[in-house]
Amino acid sequence: MAKKRPIAVDLFAGAGGMTLGFEQAGFDVLASVEIDPIHCAIHKFNFPFWTVLCKSVEETTGKEIRNSSKIANQEIDVVFGGPPCQGFSLMGKRSFDDPRNSLVFHFIRLVVELQPKFFVLENVKGMTVGKHKEFIAEIISQFSESGYQVDANYQVLNAANYGVPQNRERLFLLGARENIELPKYPEKITFPNQTSPTVWDALQDLPEIENYPELYQQDWILSEFGKPSDYAKKLRNLVTAKNNYSYKRQYDLNLLTSSLRTKHSPESMDRFASTPHGKIESISRFHKLDPDGLCNTLRAGTPSNKGAFTSPRPIHPFIPRCITVREAARLHSYPDWFRFHPTKWHGFRQIGNSVPPLLAQAVAEEIIKVLDIKSSDSAKVTKTIPQGIKDLGDISLLTLDMSAAAKYFGVNPHVIEPRTRKK
């Protein structure tokens, strides 16, 4: 019997940052659940060989996840996801009884129904502050009553410690069935002869969008790239990291995507230019990136039903403008083949809402260690470097608006309340 890759399920999948990180660690993420049809379309484009269920976890059952994907009756190795807990965000008001936090309990329900060996619950750092610890205790208690142990010494991990050039802290709760050893938290990665990758390591080889007026109308061009850093070589697929077990994708190495240009006023550009590196520009409140430092936390802004506010985008370290979606993706550790919605609003939300793939991969690798993949038992899973190159999905998936995406997946176009534009 051939050895197989371990099986995972992504709940609250978004565009697929955690899906990609787990794939890179060696998992097949056979099913993902996501409520937003536009995110589903982007997810389906990047992972066309697996299943995305376009619906709310509140209306999803474990049986449906199994039956609508290639999982069927196979044992699932890990279920992971970051249920939105806006009530615990450090940015917003904190309300212990916030109904928006009920999604956590649907995460627990689906873990219990799917009975994976492990689960990973990712969330905002604010969940660990003050009274919110009671909520974590309640989560741990519910899992305990359902046959799952949780590492009570839960940790907040910073993506910057795992090869991502961004300061981004997130809580991770790791759990396992009672008869299985708990995975450890990943150790910080140390880089020989240098610190972790910097902002400029991420951006230095990207073509200058100022040379391409067509990027005012479309988000892609064919172009020459510059000399990449070691970090950028991996994101451009010029080299493959030893620990990267993801499926190779078919794409053009000269294709620059997610790079729609923004028109700034001359006054804004003057202010951006005169702002020192690492400081906040006083009127826009945008952070100017330090080329030798780390990016500040990239945020998603609010969804359409909460006012559709765009989160402040950082200012490029050397050019007086906000960064592009592709530059944000580089700062988030997404490879260049990974595509986002061509609009800046959706593209930045898809990145800002996601776990950086390299951070997810670091967590996933610890689960692989406990799965004992070196076992000679043919029924055990194993890390396998996939052979061949996979095609990405249908290019038309990238440009769907909400109504077209909803129609494609056969769901109500108002499942996400429409964005209200200011007059």
Image: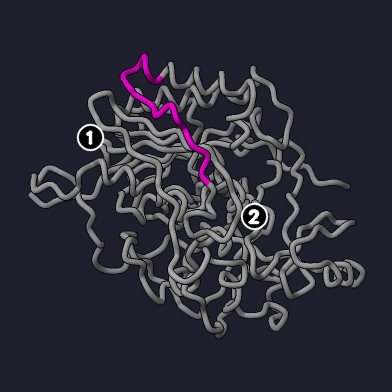
Q: Is 343 in front, or is 97?
A: 97
Q: Viewed as shown, does residue 299 lie left or right of 148?
A: right
Q: Which residue range is magenta in the image? A: 143-157
Q: What residue type is labelled 1?
A: Glu
Q: Does the magenta stretch include residue 379?
A: no
Q: Name the residue under label 2.
A: 348
The vertical placement of 274 against 18, above or below, is below
Q: Viewed as shown, does residue 379 lie left or right of 48?
A: left
Residue 306: x percent and y percent? 73, 36
Q: Which residue is rendered at x = 51% and y = 31% of the image?
A: 56
Q: Mark 1 points at which residue?
A: 75
Q: Viewed as shown, does residue 30 lie left or right of 202?
A: left
The vertical placement of 219 against 163, above or below, is below
User: What is the crowding at mark 1: few (fewer than 14 residues within 10 Å), some, or many (at least 20)?
Assistant: some
| Snapshot quadrant of residue 412 | top right
N-term-proximal mark, 2 vs 1: 1
Q: Which amino acid does label 2 sit on?
A: Phe
- Residue at the far top in the pictured view: 145
Residue 334: x percent and y percent? 50, 61
Residue 71: x percent and y percent? 27, 39
Q: Which residue is rendered at x = 38% and y = 70% of the image?
A: 250
